[in-house]
């Protein structure tokens, strides 16, 4: 029996949609966005939410995420350019609120790079005194160089 292309497309779309909903339900960051998991939220607007990292690697360590579930930076598209810009502007605003003269904004993309939560997030880290950090090739290296 032959299925029409439109029918196949609808079946695939429904499966993708159900998979995304399954991912979101099991995503700790989506649960923070929905208020189901507590977090120390420091910033929130209609697109972005930011909260303190529970395992800080610096005196100030804040995670900035989109409220929309996107797995990683490499899963973004041109439709997300405005959202990505909003995240970076949020980082600058949060840094200013925390009186950070110098800071880093880091994104870890993919499991092999050390991404542990599959919801795109940016680490805003700073607040060190008299420390000059070297760029490390892995996130754990950053932890060691403090
Ligand atoms: Zn999520």
Image: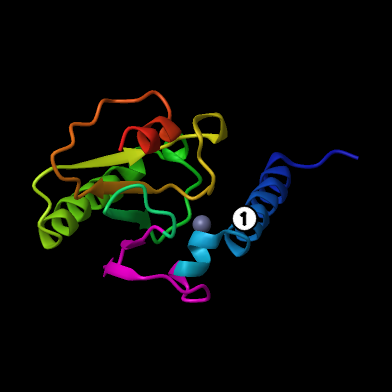
In the picture, the quarter occupied by the N terminus is top right
Which quarter of the figure has residue 112?
A: top right
Give coordinates of residue 111: x percent, y percent.
56, 35
Is residue 26 shown left or right of residue 59? right
Q: Which residue is mark 1?
A: 23
Q: Is residue 44 magenta?
A: yes
Callout 1 crowding tier (Cα within 10 Å): few <14, some 14–19, many ≥20: some
**Residue in view at x 26 percent, y 42 percent:** 105
Q: Is residue 6 magenta?
A: no
Q: Is residue 116 left or right of residue 11?
A: left
Compared to 52, does 92 lie above or below? above
Q: Is residue 113 above or below residue 46?
A: above
| Residue sticking out furthest to the front | 130
Picture residue at 31% right of the left edge, 56% below the top: 62
Question: Which of these two is toward me, 44 or 13?
Answer: 44
Q: Residue at x 85, y 38 (%)?
A: 2
Q: Estimate the x, y position of residue 71 in percent, counting from the top left.
A: 51, 45
Secondary element type, mark 1: helix
Give the quarter of the figure containing the C terminus.
Answer: top left
Q: What are the residue bounds of the magenta stretch? A: 33-53
Q: Specify whether tag 1 is near ligand 1 (CB below 8 Å).
A: yes
Judging from the image, the colouring scheme is rainbow
Residue nearest the viewer, comparing 9 with 69 = 69
Residue 41 position within the rendered picture, expressed as x and y whole percent measured from the top left: 33, 70
Residue 14, image x, y percentages:
67, 54
The quadrant holding residue 39 is: bottom left
């Amino acid at each position: 029996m032959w299925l029409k292309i439109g029918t196949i497309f609808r079946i695939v779309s429904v499966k993708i949609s159900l998979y995304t909903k399954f991912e979101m339900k099991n995503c700790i960051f989506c649960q923070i966005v929905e208020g189901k998991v507590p977090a120390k939220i420091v910033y929130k607007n209609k697109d972005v939410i930011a909260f303190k990292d529970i395992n800080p690697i610096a005196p100030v360590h804040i995670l900035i995420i989109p409220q929309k579930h996107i797995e990683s930076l490499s899963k973004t598209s041109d439709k997300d350019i405005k959202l990505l810009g909003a995240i970076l502007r949020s980082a600058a605003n949060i840094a200013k609120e925390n009186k950070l003269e110098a800071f880093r904004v880091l994104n870890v993309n993919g499991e092999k790079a050390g991404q542990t939560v599959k919801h795109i997030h940016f680490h805003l880290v700073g607040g060190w005194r008299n420390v000059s950090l070297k760029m490390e090739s892995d996130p754990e290296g950053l932890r060691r160089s403090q």
